Image: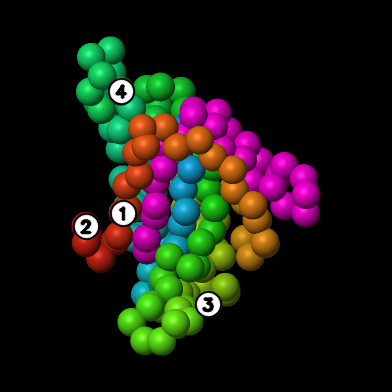
Amino acid sequence: MKVVVQRVRHASVTIDNEVYNQIDKGFLLLVGITDGDTEEIVEKIANKVVDLRIFDDMDGKMNLGIEEVGGSILSISQFTLYGDCKKGRRPSFIAAARPEISKPLYEKFNEICAKRVETKPGIFGAEMLIDLCNDGPITIVIDSKEIL
């Protein structure tokens, strides 16, 4: 599992020319699922994301978590995080889990995050336009292979 975490001042997802979901301060997440991911992995990564302390305290140090600042999450499914560009010019997405595996795990990820902080999803598999104001900019990549 890979999650790109972007600290944002605001973010929105537009589907079919209409804003589907939006947040103010918080995280825009790009969530990728690979073969072999499980509910246990999803739970660990979801909690890792929510526990990140990447918001500034009164001294300007990244010491605060999303819960402490009253932030929200906009979570977007993103199979292209598993794009392999080793050969040729067209990425291979063979490492991305098939929709019948990745959709329920993505939904479980959002469910776990939502127990702790307001979490708004995109639509799995939809063509989406993402608008964001990256704050910092702060962007963190969490890869389950590197931390579990």
- Left/right placement of residue 44 relative to residue 101 reads left
Is 23 contained in the magenta span? yes
- Whole-percent x and y of residue 37? 38, 69
Q: Which residues are magenta?
A: 1-25
- Left/right placement of residue 85 relative to residue 26 reads left
Marked residue nearer the N-terminal end (4 or 3): 4
Dots 2 and 1: beta carbons under 8 Å? yes
- Disc 3: which residue: 98
Amino acid under label 4?
A: Asp
Q: Nearer the viewer, residue 134 or 125?
A: 134
Inter-mark Cα distance, 1 to 4: 20 Å
- Disc 4: which residue: 56
Tag in front: 2 or 4: 4
Q: Residues within 10 Å of mark 3 (few under 14, many from 20)?
A: some
Above or below for 43 versus 66: below
Marked residue nearer the N-terminal end (3 or 2): 3
- Left/right placement of residue 118 relative to residue 83 reads right
Furthest residue in direction right, as rendered: 17
Visible in this render: residue 125?
A: yes
Tag in front: 1 or 3: 1
Query: In the rendered image, which quarter contains the C terminus?
Result: bottom left
Inter-mark Cα distance, 2 to 4: 24 Å
Marked residue nearer the N-terminal end (1 or 4): 4
Name the chief secondary structure element in magenta.
Answer: strand
Dots 1 and 4: beta carbons under 8 Å? no
Tag in front: 2 or 1: 1
Question: Residue 72 has which mark?
Answer: none
- Whole-percent x and y of residue 77? 53, 58
